[in-house]
Amino acid sequence: MINVLCSVFLVSLAQLLLKFASINLHTGSLSDVLLRPDALFAAPVFALLGGLICYAVSMLFWFFALRRVPLGKAYAVLSLSYPAVWLAAQFIPAIAEPFLWRSLVGVVLIVSGVVIIFSDGSGIKSRPSALKNR
């Protein structure tokens, strides 16, 4: 499960870094950045590269997670990256996403879904043997 959590952390960080880069990278094209040496060492360029690296490493953790964790549970945990990114974007001044109540409702629904998936299901029992006899 640690691989899934690392993947969630890294993919969330990647999203935040790429958002920062997209807001702050004011160039007409990639060639503008490559032709200006001072632009290569700007924070948005580091954020862009960092975001891409985080995505790549996240995929490695995801690959190893899928070897041990059932896909349904791993994917449910991965969906927690959406609330994590939304929450972080509310508090990081450089990103400053606007607060919307409908977004909060969506985050609550996602977290509720993950809780339901991981609940023991003691209130709902399926009886496969009873279904086979019909």
Image (cartoon, rainbow, N blue to C red):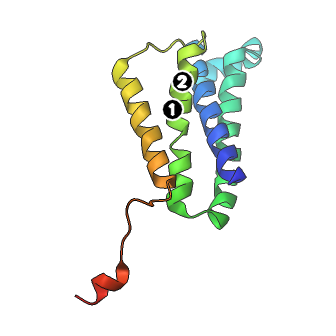
Depth check, front residue: 115 or 91: 115
Calculate the distance from the C-alpha at mark 1 to the C-alpha at mark 2: 6 Å
The spot of residue 52 in percent (x, y) is 65, 36
Specify whether 59 is left or right of 90: right
Q: Which quarter of the rendered picture does the C terminus lie within?
A: bottom left
Depth check, front residue: 14 or 103: 103
Badge 2 is on which residue? 87
Q: Is residue 27 visible?
A: no
Examine the rendered structure and indicate whether residue 68 appears above or below residue 29. below
Identified by mark 1, the residue type is Pro
The spot of residue 9 in percent (x, y) is 66, 38
Q: Secondary structure at mark 2?
A: helix
Give the image quarter of residue 17: top right
Badge 1 is on which residue? 83
Mark 1, other Cα within 10 Å: few <14 / some 14–19 / many ≥20:
some
State the residue at coordinates (47%, 39%).
111
